[in-house]
Image: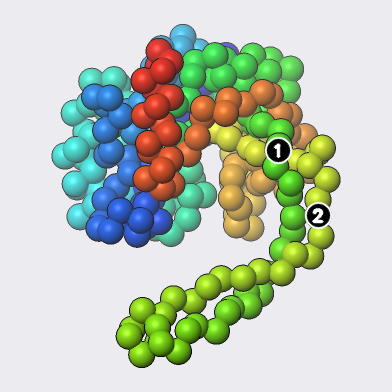
Amino acid sequence: MKVGVIITAGGRSERYSAQVGFSRSKLEEDIHGRPVLMRAIEPFTKLDAVSTIVVAGPNDDEMFADFKVKFGDRLGLLGVKLCRGGVHHRYESVMAALEHVPADCTHIAVHDGARPCVRIEMIERAFDALEHCDAVVPGLPVSETMKRVDEQDSTDAPDPAEVILGLAKTKRVRTVVETLSRDSVFVIQTPQAFSADLLHRAYAQSDLESTDDAQLVERLGETVRVVDGDPRNIKITTPADLDLARLYVKSVAF
């Protein structure tokens, strides 16, 4: 098995920046001496099966140049390739990175650059499963009650006094449509791993709207298998996620 790894790192961190109050890339945030992005990449560099790692960075000229200044040297020392990612969507970044994965790679894994707590053991579980199937994702069973809600928001009327003072905030309220059985619902993580041929076929489709790579494989009618994920393998979206990741790294040898 010869695995090419794609790391998606082209997002603008808009939700993260909104919560910290200024423009800030979550991938640059420090976790006990190393940035989020480097912690997401480094475990893959320790696996013999991995022959190539490609990071899909920002597409914007200025942002890409800044990205290279901040990460280029460190990526180069690890032998990691860097390319421009997509303009708007994650799948665009994966498509761009696929062009830089050598043709002799038998399999390709895609991992979020904002998942700094990925452990080698979980990556190996996914890779081991590739010996028997062509599409593997790590997942965790849902423990909370799951409800489907109406896509249309309703809103509470703001307090008139708050409107006058300029303090009014719209309160988002949704309507429950149904309660889902959580027995068959899993939270899916990355890395998601595939035979190279299957992933290339998935990305050759005309409709690429998706939230992960497995969704495109499902669209082909192919089977996707789930292996045990890791509850510590969180995706950094908010400052609270970063705090949690720091606790995980401090308490466990990453």
Residue 113 percent coordinates (x, y): 41, 36
| Disc 1: CA contacts within 10 A as few (<14), some (14-19) or many (>=20) | some
Q: Check disc 2 and give the amino acid type.
A: Thr
| Disc 2: CA contacts within 10 A as few (<14), some (14-19) or many (>=20) | few
Q: Which residue is mark 2?
A: 179
Check the image and report above or below for 153 versus 89: below
Q: Is disc 2 placed on a helix, strand or loop?
A: strand
Check the image and report above or below for 104 versus 157: above
What's the residue at 36%, 20% (across, down)? 250
Q: CA distance from mark 2 to mark 1?
A: 13 Å
Mark 2 and mark 1 lie on one chain; the one further toward the N terminus is 1
Quadrant that contains the C terminus: top left
Nearest the viewer among 68 and 27 is 27
Quadrant that contains the N terminus: top right
Residue 82 percent coordinates (x, y): 31, 36
Nearest the viewer among 57 and 187 is 187
Please say whether residue 157 is visible from this viewpoint: yes
Q: Is disc 1 placed on a helix, strand or loop?
A: loop
Residue 232 percent coordinates (x, y): 51, 27
Q: Which residue is mark 1?
A: 142
Q: Check disc 1 and give the amino acid type.
A: Val
Specify the quadrant of the image occupied by residue 150.
Answer: bottom right
Specify the quadrant of the image occupied by residue 213.
Answer: top right
Q: Is 201 displayed left or right of 4 in the figure?
A: right
What's the residue at 60%, 57% (across, down)? 209
Q: Is 250 displayed left or right of 104 in the figure?
A: left
What's the residue at 19%, 47% (across, down)? 65
Residue 132 percent coordinates (x, y): 74, 17
Check the image and report above or below for 252 versus 242: above
Q: Is 176 displayed left or right of 136 in the figure?
A: right
Nearest the viewer among 32 and 215 is 32
